[in-house]
C-alpha cells in the first residue's frame, strides 16, 4: 500500500515524524520532490494522498491538481495539512463544486484579535467523523490559521476557532483538511501523530475499495460505449430470474446499469429497482445514460448494503462475486437482505473458458464460479443453486434463497 506525500517545501524528503507514522502503519511512502519528481501519472498503485505545505504555484502544480482531482473523484483517502488545504479546496472548487463560505469566513488575519491563541475546538459534526471521532481535543498551543478559506458547498466543518473559521473540514467521505497542523517544519506533536495514525489506518482499511474505485473511475465515461453490444445478453439473463411484479430488485456492481431496464420490466411500475456500485463514478455515468428512468442509483459497498433484512426479492450481479476477497461474507450479506425464495442471478456475458483463453491462461480449478466450488459456497450461505450454465457465450448461475 502506497501513500504519495506531496510537499515541495523541501527536497530532503518526508518529515521524519510523518514518515515514521506512515511506515509503522505498513504504508510505503512516495515523496514528490521540489521539482515534481515522484509524482505518479495516475492512481493505479496509490492508496492515499497526504498533502503537506505546498507553494501556490510551481511547474508541477498542474499535474498535482490533476492527480488530486482524480483522487477526489475516486474517493481515494486524502489528508491535507497546513497550507496544503488550499490545494485541496482549490482543486475541489476547480472541479465544479461551488464554494460556499461560512458566515464567519469573512474574517482575515488582519481582522482577528491580536492574540491568535484562541483554542481550536471540534464541532459536533466531528463526533461522527471517521477520522476525528473520539480523537480528543486539539492541543491549546496549536496556532489556528488566521486567513479565510472558502469551502465547497458540500464541505463539513469539523473544527473551528472564534475569529478563525474552518480549522478542519471534510470533503465528501474521504478527503480531510486540517489547517492548524502545519504541513512542514513543525513537529506533528502527540495529537497530530494520533490524527495521522488514524488516517493511515483508514487508508489501510479502504485499500481494496480504493484500488477498485481508481480503476473504474478512469473508465466510467467510456464503459457504456465499450459494452453497449452486450445489452441483449443482459436482457436475456435477467429474463431467467422470473421475478414477480411489485418486488424490489437489485443490480449489484451495476456499472452503468445495463440490467436495470430489464429488471424494471420484470417488477413493473409497482416494483422498485436499485442499482448499486462501490465506485461513485459508475452510478453517475449510469444516470447520464438515463438509467434513473428505470430505478434509483446508489454508491455503496455490496458487503454492507444499506437495506433492512428480508426486503429484496431479486439480485442480479454480473462479473462481481468472483472478484471479491471474501465471497462467503458477501453471499451472507446478500442472504440477509433477501426475502425467503428470493432469486440471485450471477452472470457474465462470456463463459469461463472463453475468459481464460482471452487472458492466455488455463481454467483454474479453484475458480469460485466453477460448479464444484460455487454450489457449496451458495449452499453454506443460505442459497440453493437451481440452474448452472457455463456455455461458450455466457456464464449464468441462478440460485434461490433458502432459510
Image (cartoon, rainbow, N blue to C red):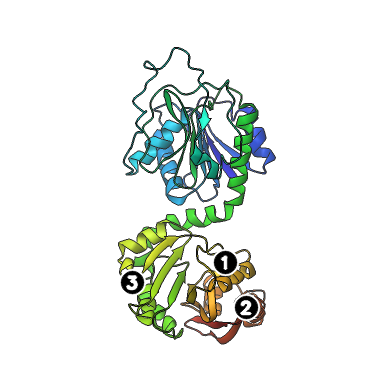
x and y, in percent, of residue 235 in the image:
38, 80
Q: Is residue 288 left or right of residue 239?
A: left
Q: Which residue is mark 1?
A: 323
Q: Which residue is mark 3?
A: 294
Seen in the picture, residue 1 relative to 283 is either above or below; the reply is above
For image coordinates 67% across by 44% down, the residue present is: 26
Q: Is residue 375 left or right of residue 174?
A: right
Placement of the C terminus among the 4 image quadrants = bottom right
Q: How many marks?
A: 3
Seen in the picture, residue 52 relative to 364 is either above or below; the reply is above
In the image as oriented, which residue stretches furthest toward the right?
A: 24
| Residues packed near mark 3 inside 10 Å, few (<14), some (14 to 19) or many (20 plus) | many
Which numbered disc, 2 or 3, marks the residue that appears first in the sequence?
A: 3
Nearest to the observer: residue 225 or residue 140: 140
Tag 2 and tag 3, C-beta contact below 8 Å: no
For image coordinates 33% across by 25% down, the residue present is: 106
Whether residue 220 is visible: yes
Seen in the picture, residue 335 relative to 147 is either above or below; the reply is below
| Mark 2 → mark 3, Cα distance in angstroms | 29 Å
Q: Which mark is residue 108?
A: none
Assign a secondary structure to mark 3.
loop
Amino acid at each position: 500500500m502506497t501513500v504519495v506525500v506531496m510537499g515541495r517545501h523541501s527536497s530532503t524528503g518526508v518529515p521524519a515524524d510523518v514518515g515514521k507514522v506512515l511506515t509503522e502503519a505498513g504504508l510505503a511512502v512516495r515523496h514528490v520532490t521540489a521539482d515534481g519528481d515522484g509524482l505518479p501519472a495516475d492512481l493505479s498503485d496509490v492508496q492515499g494522498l497526504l498533502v503537506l505545505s505546498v507553494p501556490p504555484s510551481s511547474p508541477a502544480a498542474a499535474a498535482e491538481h490533476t492527480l488530486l482531482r482524480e483522487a477526489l473523484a475516486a474517493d481515494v483517502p486524502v489528508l491535507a495539512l497546513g497550507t496544503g488545504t488550499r490545494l485541496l479546496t482549490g482543486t475541489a472548487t476547480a472541479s465544479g463544486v461551488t464554494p460556499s463560505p461560512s458566515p464567519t469566513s469573512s474574517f482575515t488575519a488582519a481582522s482577528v484579535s491580536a492574540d491568535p491563541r484562541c483554542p481550536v475546538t471540534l464541532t459536533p459534526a466531528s463526533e461522527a467523523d471517521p477520522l476525528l471521532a473520539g480523537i480528543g481535543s486539539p492541543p491549546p498551543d496549536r496556532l489556528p490559521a488566521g486567513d479565510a478559506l472558502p469551502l465547497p458547498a458540500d464541505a463539513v466543518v469539523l473544527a473551528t476557532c472564534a475569529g478563525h473559521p474552518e480549522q478542519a473540514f471534510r470533503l465528501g467521505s474521504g478527503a480531510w483538511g486540517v489547517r492548524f497542523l502545519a504541513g512542514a517544519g513543525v513537529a506533528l506533536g502527540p495529537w497530530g501523530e494520533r490524527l495521522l495514525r488514524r488516517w493511515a489506518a483508514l487508508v489501510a482499511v479502504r485499500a481494496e475499495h480504493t484500488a477498485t474505485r481508481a480503476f473504474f473511475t478512469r473508465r466510467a465515461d467510456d464503459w457504456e460505449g465499450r459494452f453497449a453490444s452486450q445489452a441483449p445478453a443482459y436482457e436475456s439473463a435477467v429474463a431467467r430470474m422470473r421475478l414477480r411484479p411489485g418486488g424490489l430488485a437489485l443490480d449489484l456492481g451495476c456499472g452503468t446499469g445495463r440490467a436495470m431496464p430489464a429488471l424494471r420490466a420484470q417488477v413493473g411500475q409497482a416494483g422498485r429497482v436499485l442499482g448499486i456500485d462501490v465506485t461513485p463514478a459508475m452510478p453517475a455515468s449510469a444516470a447520464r445514460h438515463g438509467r434513473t428512468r428505470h430505478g434509483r442509483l446508489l454508491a455503496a459497498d455490496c458487503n454492507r448494503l444499506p437495506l433492512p433484512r428480508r426486503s429484496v426479492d431479486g439480485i442480479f450481479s454480473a462479473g462481481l462475486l468472483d472478484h471479491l476477497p471474501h465471497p462467503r461474507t458477501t453471499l451472507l450479506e446478500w442472504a440477509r437482505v433477501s426475502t425467503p425464495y428470493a432469486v440471485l442471478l450471477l452472470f457474465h456475458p462470456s463463459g469461463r473458458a472463453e475468459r481464460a483463453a482471452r487472458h492466455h491462461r488455463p481454467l483454474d480449478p479453484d475458480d469460485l464460479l466453477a460448479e464444484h466450488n460455487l454450489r457449496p459456497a451458495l449452499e453454506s450461505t443460505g442459497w440453493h443453486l437451481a440452474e448452472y450454465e457455463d456455455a461458450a457465450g455466457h456464464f449464468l448461475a441462478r440460485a434461490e434463497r433458502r432459510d
